[in-house]
């Protein structure tokens, strides 16, 4: 034990820590610039392009990729798929960190972040989809925090309060699904107010449905993807149950994702038919649309299906990574790339280096905090004192 | 006959008085029954064919709103050679569209009847005033800039370089001046009466009158009468609107209606999801319970069956063992008897005393019966 501690101290300057340290330092500099010189000093945002990478990636992709929380917890607790139990805690932790970072990133993007509680507590603009997003994200972040606390309480040894929180599991899970349905879909519906700005291939009256359905396979893919990473870096922290169930989670989620993605392609085609947008498919934007739909949804969906049938987890892990990229592409297309498609190229938005730097900085914070928590608290293993409690 | 801005000026005091003291009896919202705008609301008619591109309106706007002075003075008309949009220090711009003759178009907030920006604002910092102005309240604004995303005319701007109190900027329709009974700055200064201020419903009549009175002079369309549900600013043009930088593909649907469907699903999800999910939970729980019961039953059955089978086998084994034992005893006895008989016979033979052999046989028989 003591020996391990000594080696741990010696290994403080690991490549991970060094790289993370540099990124955090750069991030700190950008942060100072942002809050002393203003948004204009660090971003390429302008009056035609009020939303850039910070909304397109940090908010849109952040929320979509944190969907693993509600997907996994509802699969386990609501749908009774107990064999996914060991995947719930890592998924909840990722979702909690994901949402926390979304809110953190918003502090950079909005003009007066100290007023972020205004829409909830001070002046409610209930006709706005953004109000709904804000309210749901606020409530869901709270739910995820409470859902995560048992791990912390086990680590700290607070048995009574842990038992009390665990009793809320069912209510919290259902509340979480309701809130996720609402804000995942509302993020898409945000753009329904601007039919004249978003390219018709991406604009649809069904945008909110597309966002909700795609959040499901985004969440599943993210659970598989981060599971793959965790197996690589934190294998020693996993207990036998986790290791034994891991393959089942990969196969089960892969199969489910394949199904949902096929359904998603179906409703995307229905959307094309409803608005009769087929003729756009032969344009440059159409090609780009097909790259997204065929290359980053259909292809990984087939790969997922094959992996599930052949019990080939490598296929599924590749498909998961591919799907995550596809979700990022989709969200960026809607919020940045195909948004303002009609503007001359000189007026189009390209993120600045400091915007990209801030995004990398925020993702790095997520990784560091995840690692900090997963190496200390019972996330990838069950605490020996509480084994019977589920 | 066009109603001049001066005529309006004189009659306006009374209108404003009535407008501000009278209370609205009906609450208007983004309903599908169709909001036709506040009945007495004002607007401005911009007759593009009359505009000469003198930029006096830009200057007046700058003065009235106390904005930063631009690098190039307002009488520098070379500025017109570049396409411009509104920004944080410029609430209105005049753009030149080359042709014969050149066409000049003023651009500013159109003050929509049902503003996309106000519908998008999540803190109600933007509101449609009953005078027709879309007003912005800086004290509520968080700075999310969703209004800028939502605006179909790309009007609101943001003071991106202000670290502490950045804000959205746009034309106010000179609401403070209207409330004082004055005309908006740009309307007042316009030397060509290219801008007419008045009640929106009257301006529509004026616009159509001009179209009918001068055949061929105007495109037969009043831009803003129906666009995005109608705007307080209205436009007349001799050139197709699309050619002078005004989008004709916006449609007539008011912005709030575009999102009302998605917003309408919210209460349904809140109401239905818990019921459905609890149902799913109950089903999965019940399935589990039944499976458990069935498993228990099956186990019981199997156990019973196994016990019976075992008992049967045991008793069979017991019988078999008893039989085997009997047989073994019999065999042994027989062996002993035979041996004894043999012995006796041998003895008899040896001693030749048949009587003694018979006695021994009697003894053995007695033993066997015991």
Image (spheres, coloured by chain):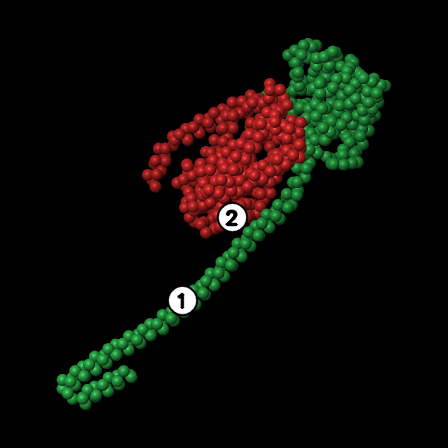
* Colour in which chain A is drawn: red
Residue A90 image point, x, y percent: 48, 41
Number of residues whose C-alpha sits closer than 10 Å to that of mark 1, classed few (under 14), some (14–19) or many (20 or more):
few
* Nearer to us in this view, B167 or B82: B82
Residue A65, position in %: x, y?
53, 36
Chain letter of the residue beneath label 2 in the structure image: A
Give me the residue at 63% from left, 43% from top. B269
Residue marked by disc 2:
A81
Q: Secondary structure at mark 1?
A: helix
Question: Residue at horizontal 66%, vertical 29%?
Answer: A195
From this viewpoint, is residue A173 visible? yes
Q: Chain of mark 1?
A: B
Secondary structure of residue under mark 2: loop
Could you tell me which residue is drawn at 61 percent across and 35 percent down? Answer: A268
Q: Position of residue A363 (x, y in %)?
A: 49, 31
How far apart are the two marked residues, 1 and 2, measured between alpha carbons?
38 Å
Nearer the observer, disc 1 or disc 2? Answer: 1
Q: Is residue B252 above or below residue B55?
A: below
Q: Relative to residue A4, is residue A83 depicted above or below?
A: below
Residue A247: quarter of image: top left
Could you classify mark 2 by the number of other residues whose Cα lies within 10 Å: few (under 14), some (14-19), or many (20 or more)?
A: some
Q: Could you tell whether A382 is left or right of B157 in the image?
A: left
User: Is there any visible trace of residue A133 in the rendered image?
Assistant: no
Q: Which chain is green?
A: B
Quarter placement of the C terminus of chain B: bottom left
Give the camera-side residue of A41 and B195: B195
Circles 1 and 2 on the same subunit: no
| Residue B66 in which image quadrant | top right
* Circle on res. B310: 1
């Amino acid at each position: 034990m003591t020996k391990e501690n000594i080696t741990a101290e010696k290994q403080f300057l690991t490549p991970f820590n060094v790289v993370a340290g540099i990124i955090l330092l750069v991030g700190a500099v950008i942060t100072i610039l942002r809050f002393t010189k203003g948004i204009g000093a660090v971003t390429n945002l302008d009056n035609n392009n009020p939303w850039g990478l910070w909304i397109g990636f940090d908010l849109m992709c952040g929320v979509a990729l944190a969907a693993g929380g509600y997907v996994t917890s509802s699969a386990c607790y609501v749908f009774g798929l107990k064999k996914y139990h060991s995947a719930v805690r890592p998924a909840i932790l990722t979702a909690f960190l994901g949402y926390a970072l979304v809110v953190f990133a918003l502090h950079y993007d909005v003009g007066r972040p100290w007023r972020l509680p205004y829409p909830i507590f001070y002046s409610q603009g209930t006709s706005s989809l953004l109000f709904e997003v804000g309210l749901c994200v606020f409530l869901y972040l709270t739910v995820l925090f409470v859902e995560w606390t048992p791990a912390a309480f086990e680590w700290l040894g607070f048995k009574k309060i842990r038992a009390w929180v665990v009793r809320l599991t069912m209510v919290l899970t259902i509340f979480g699904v309701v809130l996720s349905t609402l804000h995942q879909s509302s993020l898409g519906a945000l753009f329904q107010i601007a039919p004249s700005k978003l390219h018709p291939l991406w604009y649809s009256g069904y945008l909110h449905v597309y966002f909700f359905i795609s959040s499901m396979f985004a969440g599943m893919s993210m659970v598989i993807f981060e599971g793959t990473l965790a197996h690589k870096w934190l294998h020693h922290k996993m207990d036998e149950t986790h290791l034994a169930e891991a393959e089942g989670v990969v196969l089960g989620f892969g199969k489910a994702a394949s199904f949902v993605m096929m359904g998603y392609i179906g409703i995307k085609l229905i959307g094309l038919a409803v608005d009769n947008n087929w003729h756009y498919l032969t344009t440059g934007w159409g090609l780009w649309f097909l790259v997204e739909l065929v290359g980053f949804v259909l292809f990984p969906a087939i790969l997922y299906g094959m992996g599930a049938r052949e019990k080939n987890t490598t296929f599924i892990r590749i498909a998961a990574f591919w799907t995550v990229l596809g979700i990022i592409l989709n969200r960026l297309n809607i919020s940045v790339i195909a948004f303002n498609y009609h503007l001359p190229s000189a007026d189009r938005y390209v993120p600045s280096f400091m915007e990209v730097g801030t995004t990398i900085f925020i993702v790095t914070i997520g990784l560091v905090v995840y690692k900090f928590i997963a190496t200390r608290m019972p996330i990838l293993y069950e605490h020996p004192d509480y084994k019977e409690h589920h | 006959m066009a109603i001049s801005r001066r005529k309006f000026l004189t009659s306006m005091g009374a209108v404003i008085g009535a407008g501000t003291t009278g209370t609205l009896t009906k609450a208007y919202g983004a309903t599908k029954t169709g909001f036709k705008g506040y009945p007495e609301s004002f607007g401005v008619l911009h007759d593009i064919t009359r505009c000469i591109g003198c930029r006096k309106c830009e200057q007046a706007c700058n003065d009235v709103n106390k904005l930063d002075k631009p690098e190039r003075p307002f009488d520098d008309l070379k500025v017109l050679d570049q396409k411009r949009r509104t920004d944080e220090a410029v609430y209105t711009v005049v753009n030149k569209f080359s042709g014969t003759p050149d066409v000049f178009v003023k651009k500013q907030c159109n003050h929509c009847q049902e503003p996309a920006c106000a519908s998008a604002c999540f803190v109600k910092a933007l509101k449609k005033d009953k005078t027709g102005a879309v007003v912005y309240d800086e004290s509520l604004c968080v700075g999310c800039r969703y209004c800028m995303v939502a605006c179909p005319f790309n009007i609101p701007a943001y003071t991106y370089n202000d670290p502490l109190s950045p804000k959205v900027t746009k034309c106010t329709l000179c609401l403070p001046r209207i409330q004082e009974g004055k005309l908006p700055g740009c309307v007042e200064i316009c030397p060509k009466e290219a801008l007419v201020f008045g009640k929106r419903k009257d301006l529509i009549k004026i616009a159509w009158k001009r179209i009918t009175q001068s055949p061929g002079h105007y495109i037969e369309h009043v831009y803003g009468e129906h666009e995005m549900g109608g705007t307080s600013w209205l436009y007349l043009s001799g050139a197709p609107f699309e050619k002078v930088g005004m989008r004709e593909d916006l449609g007539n649907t008011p912005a709030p209606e575009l999102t009302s469907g998605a917003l309408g699903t919210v209460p349904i999800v809140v109401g239905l999801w818990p019921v459905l999910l609890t149902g799913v939970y109950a089903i999965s729980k019940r399935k589990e319970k039944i499976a458990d019961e069935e498993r228990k039953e099956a186990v019981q059955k199997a156990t019973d069956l196994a016990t019976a089978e075992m008992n049967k086998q045991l008793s069979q084994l017991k019988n078999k063992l008893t039989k085997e034992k009997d047989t073994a005893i019999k065999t042994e006895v027989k062996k002993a008897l035979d041996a004894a008989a043999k012995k006796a016979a041998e003895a008899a033979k040896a001693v030749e005393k048949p009587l003694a052999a018979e006695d021994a046989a009697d003894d053995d028989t007695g033993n066997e019966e015991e």
